[in-house]
Amino acid sequence: MKMKDIQSRPDRRKIPIQKVGIKDLSYPVTVLDRKNKSQDTVATVNMYVDLPHHFKGTHMSRFVELLNRYHGRVSIRELETILREMKTTFACASAHMEIRFPYFMAKRAPVSRAESLMDYQCGLTGSLEGRGKREVFDRVIEVAVPVTTVCPCSKEISTYGAHNQRSRITIRVRTRELVWFEELIEIAEKSASSPVYSLLKRQDEKHVTERGYERPRFVEDVVRGVAQQLRKNRKIKWYWVESENMESIHNHNAYALVTGENR
Amino acid sequence: MKMKDIQSRPDRRKIPIQKVGIKDLSYPVTVLDRKNKSQDTVATVNMYVDLPHHFKGTHMSRFVELLNRYHGRVSIRELETILREMKTTFACASAHMEIRFPYFMAKRAPVSRAESLMDYQCGLTGSLEGRGKREVFDRVIEVAVPVTTVCPCSKEISTYGAHNQRSRITIRVRTRELVWFEELIEIAEKSASSPVYSLLKRQDEKHVTERGYERPRFVEDVVRGVAQQLRKNRKIKWYWVESENMESIHNHNAYALVTGENR
Amino acid sequence: MKMKDIQSRPDRRKIPIQKVGIKDLSYPVTVLDRKNKSQDTVATVNMYVDLPHHFKGTHMSRFVELLNRYHGRVSIRELETILREMKTTFACASAHMEIRFPYFMAKRAPVSRAESLMDYQCGLTGSLEGRGKREVFDRVIEVAVPVTTVCPCSKEISTYGAHNQRSRITIRVRTRELVWFEELIEIAEKSASSPVYSLLKRQDEKHVTERGYERPRFVEDVVRGVAQQLRKNRKIKWYWVESENMESIHNHNAYALVTGENR
Amino acid sequence: MKMKDIQSRPDRRKIPIQKVGIKDLSYPVTVLDRKNKSQDTVATVNMYVDLPHHFKGTHMSRFVELLNRYHGRVSIRELETILREMKTTFACASAHMEIRFPYFMAKRAPVSRAESLMDYQCGLTGSLEGRGKREVFDRVIEVAVPVTTVCPCSKEISTYGAHNQRSRITIRVRTRELVWFEELIEIAEKSASSPVYSLLKRQDEKHVTERGYERPRFVEDVVRGVAQQLRKNRKIKWYWVESENMESIHNHNAYALVTGENR
């Protein structure tokens, strides 16, 4: 039996749709890992295409079919290929894909050298828009890095101690060539009062405490520190840097944002 | 004792900060209500200003002091005034404020007329940028409206039944004059297969089920239906319409977005 | 037209249901406030009853109708009355209600005495079970209190500084008489290294930093400190005390739990 | 330099702590898979021990060290071994571990047989309490399964259509022998109006829609259906079954719970 194809029917409202697709699909992915070549993790996937004004609907199942064909290869290297295939499959003018996942790096404690795994929320966002020679591929690489920040004001005005907290630095970049998540994570960690670790022995805790106290950073310092490193990195074309401090003395957060372009 | 003012110290990195401030502050607010004049609710508040490159930090406590002065009056009418006061207090070039809160409307069930309260997530985002004659006030009004959507494809191809689900329509608008949350909520509810209610008696459930089945809507239909109404509304300058369907036959969501401007 | 009442049909599986009802209903409530008599806030409400094995279903709309009758009076004083009415309405053996809401207290900064509002997540859980003389009313009062904790180990082993973080202390109690949220909040704040505040001027920040440094507390110390106060409070019959520290040097949390009964 | 061991100092408050440890650690794990032997995923891990009243604190880093030794082998088979090692490492009377992770199963669409991956939230909770011959190992296996439910009342009273929605069935069991996540997932899916799928072609959508309409289920029916199957399964000692329906006609959920023991 041939079934009716409701989605392909005409729509007369003359309203093109910028993005239509699937959101929050949980999916296992294998991503590139600088040290271990690849890493298995679980992503949240969004895939959208545009829909011209004269079509009623999108064939949603095609997103999942397409994703299934790339199962085990959803990485930064395949992103453009997947988007191109989306454009072909949907015969559309623009395709968008967003994937976010926990990413792990083995990290050594600063003194004991004890190794443990740290988790970072990483992501890739891509779009392919326009036709023929005017087609433009756009890709944003994203990392969210937990760090420690020690408050410079609190340190300066207090006879002893200084309030500090867990903060999360989010970096998004457009790049001229491939940039590893690891590079961005290192930039974030260097800009904070201290990196955080899953495993710290007592001698490490002493080191991390003292080092953080020696390097107090406002939320403003953190985003400026990251931006400064990204500005002089020739691989970076555009950056978006946020830091959010889960202030230990308040029940709200401190926040700062710097964004800019490298010419 | 005069304390050191670390925040006012110079910074030499030549990096201006676009936004710095407080995020996710929980705060009781009184907002305008079309029917009852005002309504008490609890908001999540973000307040940011820019920071010129030569200053090290922002005085975060001033955001909360300023908010306290407007306690009980944080509404769409005060938004520009608060932003102007932020600009004065921080001697800055731009000020931003975002508040989001549950908002309740009394709603009658379609047949029994039983009344109950429906909750909508509403929000106001404002910014005031530039100096003197070039100062620009920008305001976005936001509502997130839960509705029912019945799938037209499922209805058409099935001998009986049709899958349906709770969906959330988000509308953001820039307007030429004040638009009530209630107006936007009504536009969203009209564009879905059916509104949702807190309280439905059996006769209402029958009505809502049959009405939804008679009015199947794809996620694409929903955003087009909302956009169509916003396009012909002369109060609206700009719109951003999203719908997200918590598909009853999948564990992921269907999503569509239309945005545009009215000349 | 008389409609069929499917819910009242028999079920033959012989499986009684312990709890059936509505969950995560957003609802505006007015709760008791020690200082201001009452406070308007927005609650998340769960209401459940048991269902004997021989009935097929529950009439869900009755929960919302019942709640509507208590609109504006959903407080600790009405909890038992509401539960009793649930038992009558549903002709059931047990009724359960859970409400949770942000609750605000005006709080003065320790040195400047600047006043601001602090938010706490508070809750009430009640159940009424059994029939006639064997009916038992059970009520749990709950507060979740954000505080600062300074790590005693980090302080002791470090030449300067000490890592600290925002922590959340959750207290649940069964009581012999009414206990104010404010009393439990004060107990939690006293047991931490320092309370947190929405508004702190520089002299307050110095005070809070130094005071916290002078009073380092492990997550274990925090729950013991709370338990110690609850143990000697004759109003308290049973307590459940958790603390969760959003460790500033890790991306995971430290957690401790103490529970016990006062004879 | 020998560092002070603050945690091992005495505490004089005479308050033993039931649980102390680490919470919400993100960690990659390899879990057992009925079909593919093993599956890589990312877990959230909680590990707690008790602390006798006379000790001040716990050595938190030991939890992560211990977990690292089992890296790649954190499965149901190792749970008791890990708990025993926790008891030895901490010289404690009780040890607790909770891990939760997305788990994927390849699933074929009902008509087209198109294969795709479905995600389920699975978990393992274990504790080992008491000493010597009185030591008791307790293990709970948990699955959360998204399904479709079609409302029997809505179907019965409506001339056409029936409201339906995504629901989530949570099953927790104590068992006499190993039970696969897959077995529990199948029990949940059989008890709903229909399973959900990541990938459905048009003929599948027709099938799923009609099948769901033919098998309407209240939230009460769902938990009873699961309980009925668990009651006659001799591997099951104890069960806890919840269903939560994201009602398509309300903005709140319907909820039911059945728990019981098999003698």
Image (cartoon, coloured by chain):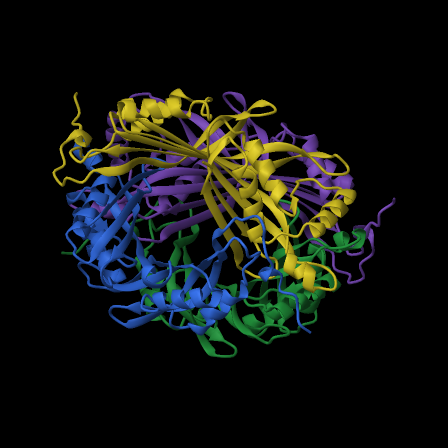
Chain colours: A yellow, B blue, C green, D purple
Q: Is residue A86 left or right of residue D39?
A: left
Q: Is A136 situated above or below C56? A: above
**In x, y percent, where is residue C257?**
65, 55
Q: Is residue D4 left or right of residue C107?
A: right
Residue at image position (50%, 55%) is B52
Residue A199 visible? The answer is: yes
Residue at image position (63%, 28%) is D73
**In x, y percent, where is residue B142?**
31, 55
Residue B41, quarter of picture? bottom left
Quadrant where the N terminus of chain A lies?
top left
**In x, y percent, where is residue D124?**
57, 37
In terms of depth relative to the viewer, which is nearer, D240 or C187?
A: C187
Q: Is C27 situated above or below D235? A: below
In terms of depth relative to the viewer, which is nearer, C131 or D238?
A: D238
In terms of depth relative to the viewer, which is nearer, A136 or D249?
A: A136
Number of numbered tags placed on the structure image:
0
Q: Residue furthest left?
A: A12
**In x, y percent, where is residue A257?**
48, 49
Q: Residue furthest right?
A: D1
Residue at image position (46%, 26%) is A76
Q: Is residue C25 left or right of residue D14?
A: left
In terms of depth relative to the viewer, which is nearer, D111 or B22?
A: B22
Q: Is C229 situated above or below A22? A: below
Quadrant where the C terminus of chain A lies?
top left
Residue at image position (25%, 63%) is B180
Q: Is residue D42 left or right of residue B224?
A: right
